[in-house]
Amino acid sequence: MLVSNDIRNIVIVGGGSAGWMTAGVIAAEHMANSKSGVKVTLVESPDVKPIGVGEGTWPTMRSTLKKMGIAETDFIRECDATFKQGAKFARWVTGDRDDAYYHPLVLPQGFDQINLVPFWQEESVKRPISFADAVCFQGHLCERGLAPKQNTTPEYAHVANYAYHLDAGKFSVFLQNHCIKKLGVTHILDHVTKVNGAENGDIRSLSTKLNGELQADLFIDCTGFNSLLLGKHYQIPFVSKKHILFNDAALAAHVPYESAESPIASHTISTGQSNGWIWDIGLPSRRGVGHVYSSAHTSDEKAEQELRDYIRASIGEKADQLDLRKISIEPGHRQIFWHQNCVAVGLSAGFLEPLEASALVLVELSAAMISEQMPASREVMDIVAKRFNDKFHYYWDRIIDFLKLHYVLTKRTDSQYWIDNCDPQSIPSELSDLLTLWRYQPPWQKDFTQVDEVFPSASYQYVLYGMGFETKRRPTRRTSENAELAHASFQKNAQITQKLLAGLPTNRELIKKIREFGLQKI
């Protein structure tokens, strides 16, 4: 029997970004720091260090931090955060040195009114211009290392839409302090020795080494790859996606800048290699650089050599002295995410390569839905669990499709890795159908069914046309009104681009000012 049919007591097992973000979101919304609120307890082992691979975020992180009552100035100062305005994909199409395109975080100009793809196709015949540059200013800002706002712009407000790069280890500590001191989360450092079941199949309590039994109405599994509750206790199977996404290993390094004044990239740089790709993330005091690769196509030694060669281009022979950390990746997710009175968040639910920074956003989405749909009683929990599982199966499928999209559009044939990635057998059927559709009509709003899609149709446009995908131009009726709107959109984008290039500081300049003076409060 549970202590109460009402959901009043929540235990989160495991810390790190997943545990503390989930704790913070729930505690803030359900008033854990008041007597009438829900009790939130986080228990974590003092011996387990977080994996800490998630240094990239989505713009959603701004609203998540704001909901938790976190000041953006404090976050930037304490977590070594910088601004991220998208991703630059280099050497993904042909592998040549000049092969690059952007996936920005700003929607195409006039996106709520018109699909600019057919009009861009007509324009680019007369004047070659990339799709991203024609419809959006953000690639130009990134190329010049500019920030997405001024230091007079209020906290969380923006001139150009942005996310963050951050130090994952410092982020966990920052969230922990905020959750304990401001939000009323109880923190227990202890080893969980046993998971105790109830007669109805729920988890009744956890036995701990020093604090005895911890009872709760809802248990949240944030134990990382260990998946102590959902995986080990409930034996929920892991569904591998390695037949779609081949990368199963990563080597990561902390790379110093050449000088304290070196530019900080305003975007993630993802550079294709012979059997994988290298991420490059700029923080104030260092870069986070790592090589994600397929062990079926290359060896650890060759992957390390490519990584050191990449780093050597910026810091010379110091690259040979850097320590590397190996991270094993099992691409995939649990068969279900919420079972009985236990829900998994973060790595315990699954993991995919960090190509589009999906790890932390899945934590955000999970924490938000658990908090917003918090079951009032055990009676309704199974209904909420079913809705949660349906929603997150959809999210995982769409993220997997979108990651695979980057690979199937390549024209590279210089290694078996790139050839195998284009094998139709490795392409999910829904993505395959969409690619067939998009040969005849460009992606648009009704191609996807959910109101809260993880990737809007604009993201598919940026990747498709950035990688040289061709949609056949059909002779359809062009109204003068539409043609004028498209022309006005292109003109407006060009004007905004020039204005922002002249008025925005560099990423490093803005971070320096925030550290010294802070941002304006909203």
Image (cartoon, rainbow, N blue to C red):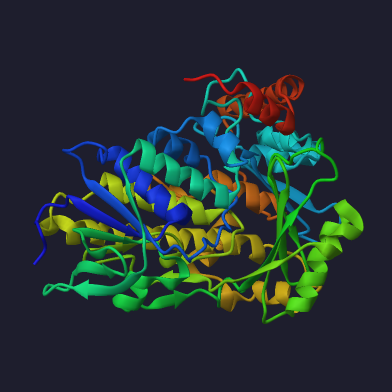
| Residue drawn where x is 38% and y is 63% of the image | 393
| Residue drawn where x is 20% and y is 52% of the image | 9
Given residues 119 and 201, the one toward you in this image is 201
State left or right for residue 294 relative to residue 26.
Answer: right
The percent position of residue 207, horizontal first and vertical second, equals 26, 70
Is residue 434 among what the camera can see? no
| Location of residue 339 with respect to 489 vertically, above or below | below
| Location of residue 186 with respect to 355 vertically, above or below | above
State left or right for residue 198 relative to residue 484.
Answer: left
Which residue of the protein is positioned furthest toward the front in this rendering?
210
Given residues 335 and 103, the one toward you in this image is 335
| Location of residue 147 with respect to 503 vertically, above or below | below
Given residues 303 and 403, the one toward you in this image is 303
| Residue drawn where x is 40% and y is 32% of the image | 69
Quadrant position of the N terminus in the picture: bottom left
| Location of residue 128 with respect to 400 vertically, above or below | above
| Residue drawn where x is 91% and y is 56% of the image | 316
Q: Quadrant of residue 237?
A: bottom left
Is residue 404 among what the camera can see? yes
